[in-house]
Amino acid sequence: MKRSLILLAIVLILAGAAVYQNNGKHDDALAASSDVRPKPGYTAPTLTLPDLKDQNVAIGGKQDKLTLVNFWASWCYPCEMEAPDLQALAKEYKGKLQILGINATSLDKERQAREFVDQQKLTFPILMDRKGNAQELYKVNSFPLSVLVDGNGIVRERVQGVIDKSKWQEMIDKWLDAAIEEKASGNAASKAS
């Protein structure tokens, strides 16, 4: 009996969450909890990690641009395959897209991670997840893993593994266009009132 009540409560909570999430308001997206991995429509977890110069960089939350958060390790061959495309995207979308590379430093050697950055000639910010906090919050269980987060801090895409640069461009363009439309409709609404 007790078990049935608990299951009923869980079903009602999930149904309520689904209705709440699908009401079309970006600011009201559900926050990712410890048992749910950040996925499209959910708020990206927020935290701060040091970059290669030990300067703290904020991840998640409202940002002034679309953000691509990429989790990688120096020993990960698919990460090595993906790195040139990420660097090309950083140059192509400069000013419109922020790429943050998060090294799984808790599972990697920091010296090797720095060598990887130098070898790949990566110019976008590289953050060091020395304690594994970011991996835990973003539920990273294999590499590479990338999360595309809009300016409102909402996860729009979650990509496990490597995808073609053209597929990235398609996703990035889609969410950049959505941000322009949202801004335009917000400006039109403010003018009308």
Image (spheres, rainbow, N blue to C red):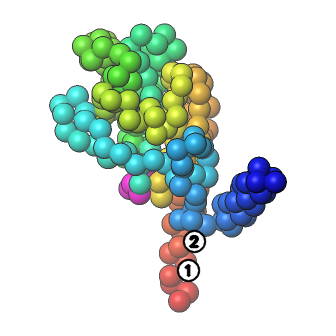
Looking at the rendered structure, the secondary structure element under dot 2 is: helix
Q: Residue furthest bottom?
A: 193
Which residue is pictured at 18% across the width and 31% down the height? Answer: 53
Which residue is pictured at 54% across the width and 69% down the height? Answer: 184
Residue 55 in which image quadrant: top left
Looking at the rendered structure, the secondary structure element under dot 1 is: helix
Q: Nearer the viewer, residue 37 or 1?
A: 1
Where 187 falls versus 55 (above or below)? below
Find disc 1 in the rendering and name its residue: 189
Q: Nearer the viewer, residue 17 or 146?
A: 17
Label 2 with label 1: CB-CB less than 8 Å: yes
Q: Nearer the viewer, residue 169 or 71?
A: 71
Which residue is pictured at 77% across the width and 57% down the height? Answer: 5
Predominant SS of the magenta segment: loop
Residue 57 is left or right of residue 74, and the answer is left
How many numbered tags mark residues here? 2
Q: Distance from label 2 to label 1 (Cα)?
A: 6 Å
Question: Bounds of the magenta span?
Answer: 62-66
Find disc 2 in the rendering and name its residue: 185
Residue 18 is left or right of residue 187, and the answer is right
Q: Check disc 1: other Cα within 10 Å, few if <14, some if 14-19, many if 20+.
A: few
Give x and y (percent) for residue 187: 50, 75
Give x and y (percent) for residue 107: 38, 18
For the residue marked with disc 1, what is the amino acid?
Ala
For the residue marked with disc 2, what is the amino acid?
Ser
Q: Check disc 2: other Cα within 10 Å, few if <14, some if 14-19, many if 20+.
A: few
Residue 16 disc label: none
Q: Nearer the viewer, residue 41 or 12?
A: 12
Residue 192 in which image quadrant: bottom right
Residue 92 is left or right of residue 11, and the answer is left
